[in-house]
Image (cartoon, rainbow, N blue to C red):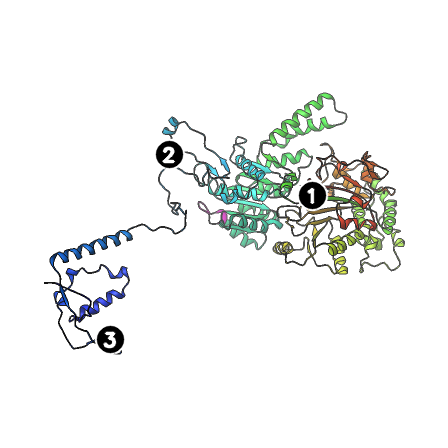
Amino acid sequence: MYYVVAHQPLFFENADWLSGYWIIRSLAPSQRGKRPLLLDVPHDIVELTQSENYIQESKRRTKNVKDIQIPERKVVPLSDNGICTMQKIVSEHEERVRKLLSKPFQIPIPGYQLSGRVLGLRLPGPRRPLHDPDEPNALIVYSPPELSEHDRLKVDPCKQLVHVVVDPILCNVLRPHQREGVKFMYECVTGKRIENAYGCIMADEMGLGKTLQCISLLWTLLKQGPEAKPLIEKAIIVAPSSLVKNWYNEINKWLNNMVNTLAIDGGKKADIDTQLIRFMKTYGRCVTPILIISYETFRLHAHVLHQDEVGLVLCDEGHRLKNSENQTYQSLMGLKAKRRVLLSGTPIQNDLLEYFSLVHFVNQGLLGTAQEFRRKYETPILRGQDAAATDAERIVAQERLSDLVSIVNKCLIRRTSALLSKYLPLKHELVVCIKMGELQTQLYKNFIQSDSIKRSMEENDNSKKTGSLSALAAITLLKKLCNHPDLIYDKIKEKADGFEKAASLLPPNYSTKELMPELSGKLMVLDCLLASIKTTTNDKIVLVSNYTQTLDLFEKLCHKRSYNYVRLDGTMTIKKRAKVVDNFNSDSSNDFIFMLSSKAGGCGLNLIGANRLVMFDPDWNPANDDQAMARVWRDGQKKPCFVYRFLSTGTIEEKIFQRQAHKKALSSTVVDQEDDVARHFTINDLRDLFKLEENTVSDTHAKFKCKRCINGIEVKGPLEQSDCNSDLSDWRHSHNPRHLPDIPLRQCWASGISFVFHHRSHEQVK
């Protein structure tokens, strides 16, 4: 017979079972196993007797022996029905616990769903797109052709095409024009827009986010395609050396470090070759699928990069490739890359050969060979642009030009910065005409009236080279003189051509060691402007010049006025450039001025830490000026921007600016290299360049023959829809400081300002 124990402490004669019971109680549930049923308990354990003896507690639990007295307990007999009831209760409990433990694990995050994907395992069933095309805000760059239900039954589910959807991480930050740009480029590189042509030119103006659009395209091609597999395995980004680090940072920023990139710019030749060979010889799933390399490094190591095929090549600042005969162009043409994207925020100049070189790079053969292009397009168009062309020639020229533009526009997309007005603060552009100082004027007149200048112009007209001073050298000297006499002091001391009698004009104690701003009209205005900005605002400013000698003057001025500054020119290493830019843009930086050489990496830099910029001297190529001036008014800028262009009134600087503002027809192109300046100007052009217009507040305004200004007063404002992208004649014209939009500039008028053109980027929403 069995017994059950009730309410009284027990004495167990079978001490071994008791110690085993304690061991079971001390184990984890998974180690303990099943709880023993009542029927499994030995019979001698249930038999109870009265005893006055004490049991010794297990030595395992404690070294101290304690006597425990077990009082007498009453025994209640258990019937057969009771035993069955207990077994039933235990069984139900076991069943309940086992049922709870058999439930699958659930992630304790509301709404979380497992993707069902396993690394390295291809899931069975039909193909599926990488991202859901039905998600809100999804950017679909490819949609498979719609099939009828009958045709769908015939298609193998494992071979059907799927949607290509840009990663939602990028979709959520792309603006409408950027979404359009990504889709355009995808259609180009997949051959949808032009049959058997897989290249395109992204020619959006500066600040419209070309980098982000290209990163979106690159990431999409690396991760997906219509056949549910990546379209490319690896890609190469070629950029100016100053932008290699910037591309690396931008990719990591937008893709949250989801892809490995290899950035190379300089180093030992053997080390670079090793890295490039490793990159080129990796196939399938590449650990590092993106290479960022500078143009110079690419050219030097082209023999390695030409060995294997690359899925995509992307060329930043692509206007470098407008000359199809240089080594960089030829090196890139030798790359085995079918898909090619060229970025250029610079407006394509009015030169048909530039059109050919750029289009030929991205889509080789689209416009035929150079000879075919010249015969079919260039010659008829140029002939039709001639003033003596017949009506028939003009008609043919218009037809060929329309034909050319229609072909190029299939692989070229360009939007203007007017789109930025929706996202960026107001920008004011001001062209400031400044009278030269008295010493500058004397030196200027002495130079242009010298015998050397007269001989230089005659030689240019007669193609004779008897003198030592070329027209180009004379132009450069005049441009430097407009900045400050210090820049030509060495020539004056040497009594160089044109400055034979200039030394007598200098003050007795003239020295370049101590900067004298009052000797230069532009530097006086700049000095006053910086002082006004520093004392009345917390703005930062960028100073841009084409000459490092002018940056030296800026440094002397900063030391004189105790301004904190940084300087970026060709002597600064690429690694240091990135650190300097990041530090200047940070709110904690104390730097007030950023000095920038427009010839040494001004392109692509993001200087949104400043909201004011001074273009101290003009360049022959308007694109260089536009690139430099776009450094501050771009994505991320939070403050209203002011861009100043300084011109010396009536001098060669105004003549250069006029050639920028009024581009000539296709037959006479805008000159973009100073080496070509002299041969593009006739003797009359040169005489005009070397002429000083003294009795004018602005030679540019005088040449407009402006009808809106009467007796020095603007009686009629510009058109309502005009902005700073409009022609200069449609800007506001200020003969006095009263209506200037910039208070610090008003305070500088008396320092030598004679006239100001100004306009804003868009109408400010009130």
Question: Is any atom of residue 504 visible in this view?
Answer: yes
- Does residue 185 lie above or below 90 as drawn? above
Q: From the image, give the main secondary structure of the stretch colored magenta.
A: loop
Disc 2 secondary structure class = loop
* Closer to us: 528 or 477: 528
Residue displayed at 19% across by 60% down: 36
Q: Give the class, few, some or many, for how many residues have Cα within 10 Å of label 1's Cα (few <14, many ≥20).
A: some
Residue 326 at x, y percent in the picture:
64, 42
Residue linked to disc 1: 626
Q: Amino acid at mark 1?
A: Asp
Q: Which residue is depicted at the point 47% across and 33% down? A: 143
**Is residue 647 shown left or right of residue 220?**
right
> Which corner quadrant holds the N terminus?
bottom left
Q: Given contact means CB atoms under 8 Å apart, are the residues at marks 3 and 1 in contact?
A: no
Which corner quadrant of the image does residue 562 belong to? bottom right
Which class describes the residues within 10 Å of circle 2: few (<14), some (14-19), or many (20+)? few
Read off the residue under disc 2.
157
Where does the magenta region start and end? 279-288
